[in-house]
Image: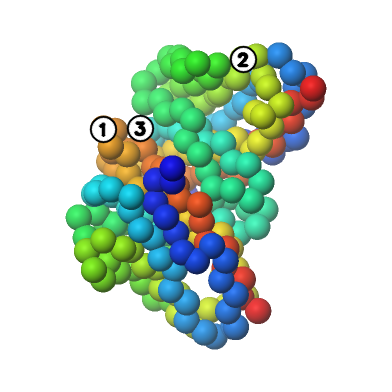
Amino acid sequence: EPEVTQTPSHQVTQMGQEVILRCVPISNHLYFYWYRQILGQKVEFLVSFYNNEISEKSEIFDDQFSVERPDGSNFTLKIRSTKLEDSAMYFCARGGGGRVTEAFFGQGTRLTVV
Amino acid sequence: QKEVEQNSGPLSVPEGAIASLNCTYSDRVSQSFFWYRQYSGKSPELIMSIYSNGDKEDGRFTAQLNKASQYVSLLIRDSQPSDSATYLCAVRGYSGGGADGLTFGKGTHLIIQP
């Protein structure tokens, strides 16, 4: 059973368009994260979300990106004005239960910008 | 700039043998260390976490941490063909708290030969 459920599994968008990736936690946790992995490259941290606020963000997470928890449950990652180099797998992860420093990943959304 | 280095491989190991995977990290104050397994096209799956110097065993897996040498390793005993995957080393920053993002290495591609 996945720790979080991500939708869609694959998204194709035209360059310059906005995309919204969604993450649905299976149960209540305090810590959530977004990571991305460009094909053939390492997994990269984008942003962490704690107690409904952004806690930490990387240099990658610039003004093109935003995160929200619009209904108190689902998480969204919005990418504005997509570029070809935004093509990647985007993973949502949740913090661990007893040991909050562990991260458990969802199945990912493959974003293809054409 | 935090760096996590791994030999990209491929590392080829006969079935039933011990596979040894290594990782070094640059940030001396890192507190939490993780090994993830990633099958091609899938999301990272947490297999081990370690926080203190020494060895930690879980089934066929043993994680080893040496903070003085900034070195983490993973041993897989009785290797099985299903262990063939890319193994990612990940490190969490100095505060060790759950909100910090993980820094990943590029991963070692492990092949278990039947």
Residue to which mark 3 is pinned: B31
Amino acid type for the residue under numbered disc 3: Gln
Find residue B65 and report its horizontal and vertical position in percent: 46, 21
Judged from this view, the residue extending furthest toward the bottom is: A16
Residue to which mark 1 is pinned: A98
Q: Which of marks 2 and 3 is nearer the N terminus?
A: 3
Find residue A111 and report its horizontal and vertical position in percent: 57, 68
Distance from Cα at disc 2 to Cα at disc 3: 26 Å
Quadrant in which residue A24 is drawn: bottom left
Residue to which mark 2 is pinned: B77
Is B108 rendered above or below residue B12?
Answer: below
Please tell me whether mark 3 or mark 1 is closer to you in this view. Answer: 1
Specify whether B21 is left or right of B2: right
Q: Mark 3 lies on which chain?
A: B
Q: Name the residue at 47% across, 35% down.
A: B46
Find residue A92 and report its horizontal and vertical position in percent: 42, 55
Dot 3, how many residues are within 10 Å of its Cα: few (below 14), some (14-19), or many (20+)? some
Q: Name the residue at 62% across, 26% down.
A: B21
